[in-house]
Each structure stands twice: as structure tokens, then as C-alpha cells.
Image (spheres, rainbow, N blue to C red):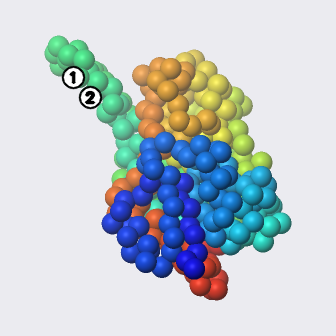
Amino acid sequence: MKSKIYITRKLPDYIIKKYEEKYEITMWNQAETPVPRDVLLKEVADADALFSTLSEEINDELFEVGKNLKVVSNLAVGFDNIDLKAAHKYGVPVTNTPDVLTETTADLTFALLMATARRLIEGSKCIEENKWENWAPFMLAGTDVHHKTIGIVGMGRIGEAVAKRAKGFNMNIIYHNRSRKADFEIAVEADYYDFDELIEEADFVVSLLPLTNETKEKFNKAVFKKMKNSAIFINVSRGGVVNEGDLYNALVSEEIRAAGLDVFADEPIQNDHPLVSLDNVVALPHIGSASVETREKMINLCFDNIDAVLSGKKPLTEI
């Protein structure tokens, strides 16, 4: 009898096909819409493995229902949607997808930084709305990226990849992390700063923090007040590390220049979200790792983790 895998989003047939001979695969039938909670609980009741995304809350209730679960494989690096204590209690290993999305997310981070700094979205809208009537010396004038100071908060794999890109733009690289990385500092000529010092010094503050009790709303009114009035805030980590009301006020009052955001506290957001109404905000729908190549690698790694556990081996990337 084949082991059963339940997948919480519809994935491409060409990827699923190679696993169907070995496993019984059941899958939610929509790619863009999260699986309803009642459907998830029903399907997980007899599943041996759960292939999840960030949209699903994997908690005590789910593990209690899914008594046959042997592994949860999460399609993300982050795992704040999963109660790891509950998983440990029920003896279910949880895996994620590190490394494979590092470079792609770093690309997006730097693209978001540049789009915000150079007001690219505003420029595109200017033409789209037929408002380009003539040329003016300071029309849509943004700020330079080259030779500015980038302050990276959270120097993990993605942070290191962003720093390497910044070096190519001759930026001054400063960072804050729970621990210093001496070899990395030498490699990219980066300097370690205390958090408050970084906030005051950086022209671009880039958040790459995981969401934890310690980092929740770390970027708040007091922090934005310490930033330069010309500073740009970029968040490609988790929306919950920011107090969005405080960020809105800082942008409206011009305490900081602009913000580029790929993540929000409660996703998805709609176009009536306060931050979306601001011209000095570039908002993206959580697409940090969204390239075809990287998503394929992430999906395959999720299956590799499931296959390892169901074959009696250790998972490749257990959290």
C-alpha cells in the first residue's frame, strides 16, 4: 500500500508525475487559493506526509487529527506558520527549503531597493496614466544607490547574498546580526554595528530577520525616528517584524523617505491597505523567491525531504 502525501496547493503536473508511481498523492485543486481549514483537517487525517505552504497553520489541532503524519515539509525558509513545540510533542519532523532560494530572494531584495530608490513604479504609472507632459530637471528624481550605506539587519544566507550585490554597486556595507561573521566581513569589507548605530547610519535599512518573539515589531516608531530623514526601509523578511502603523506615520510625516515591502503582517493585503496608498511605497505580493527555476527547486526539495523520511532515512533539511 502506497504512503499518502497531501499537498496544500496545486502544483504543476510535470513535477508531481515523477512521484505518483511511488506515492498516493492528493492535492488541493487550486494554486492561488489556500486550502480551507476543514478540508485540510479532513485530508491530513490519513496522510503520512504533509506538503505545506506558509498559508497553513500547522498546530496542535492538526497534529492531533493527523495521527499518521511522519513529516511536514514546508515550502519556504520561514516556518512561523508551524508550531514546532507541537510537532516535537507528536514526534513529527518539520523541514523547510533553505539555500535553494537564497540568490533569487537576494535578486528581488536588490531589485526592490532600486525600484524604491529610483521611483520606478511611480515612473511607470506616470506613463500608464498619461501624465508625462514634458521633461523637468527634478521630475521623479529619486536617490542614488551607488556609494550609499546599506544596513542589513539579519545576516543569514540571504543577507550575505544581498551584501555581495551591494558591493558591486560600491556601497558601504554595515550589518547587525546575533553573532558576528568575521570571515564574511573580510570578504565583502562589511562592518558590524549595534542595531541602534546601524539604524542611525544607514541610507538603506534592509530587514532580513526571521519572525520570532524577539523580532516582532522590532521596526517601530522609536526605530523609524532614529533613521535618517533620507533613509529608505526595505523589508523582504516577514511583515510581523514591522509595526505597520508606525511605518505609515513615519512615511507620511517624512521621518523616512520611502519603503519597499515584499511582506506584510496579514497577507494577502488589498489595495485599500494604508501603506499601498502612499506614493513613496513600493509594495509587492510576497514574491521574494518567485522565479520558475527556484520554485521548482523548492518543490523538489520538499519532496526529497518527504521521500527521505518515508523511506526510513533522516530528512535533508530538518528545522
Can you identify the residue that label 2 sits on? 124
Relative placement, left or right, of 209 versus 276 is right
For this rendering, which residue is in front, 123 or 64?
Answer: 64
Q: Residue furthest front?
A: 1
SS label for mark 2? helix
Please tell me which residue is depicted at 23% across the width and 22% down the height of the picture: 128
Q: Which mark is residue 47?
A: none
- 115 versus 124 height, above or below: below
In terms of image quadrants, where is residue 156?
Answer: bottom right
Residue 232, position in %: x, y? 50, 36
- 149 versus 68 height, above or below: above
How crowded pointer 2 is (Cα within 10 Å; few <14, some 14-19, many 20+) is rated as few
Q: Quadrant of the N terminus?
A: bottom right
Q: Residue furthest right?
A: 89
Residue 220, position in %: x, y? 69, 33
Q: Is residue 67 in view?
A: yes
Q: Is residue 200 in view?
A: no
SS label for mark 1? helix
- 33 versus 193 height, above or below: above
- 39 versus 163 height, above or below: above
For this rendering, which residue is in front, 29 or 234?
Answer: 29
Can you identify the residue that label 1 sits on? 127
Residue 284, position in %: x, y? 44, 38
Please tell me which residue is depicted at 44% across the width and 47% down the height of the picture: 30
- Could you tell me the amino acid type at mark 1? Ile
- Could you tell me the amino acid type at mark 2? Ser
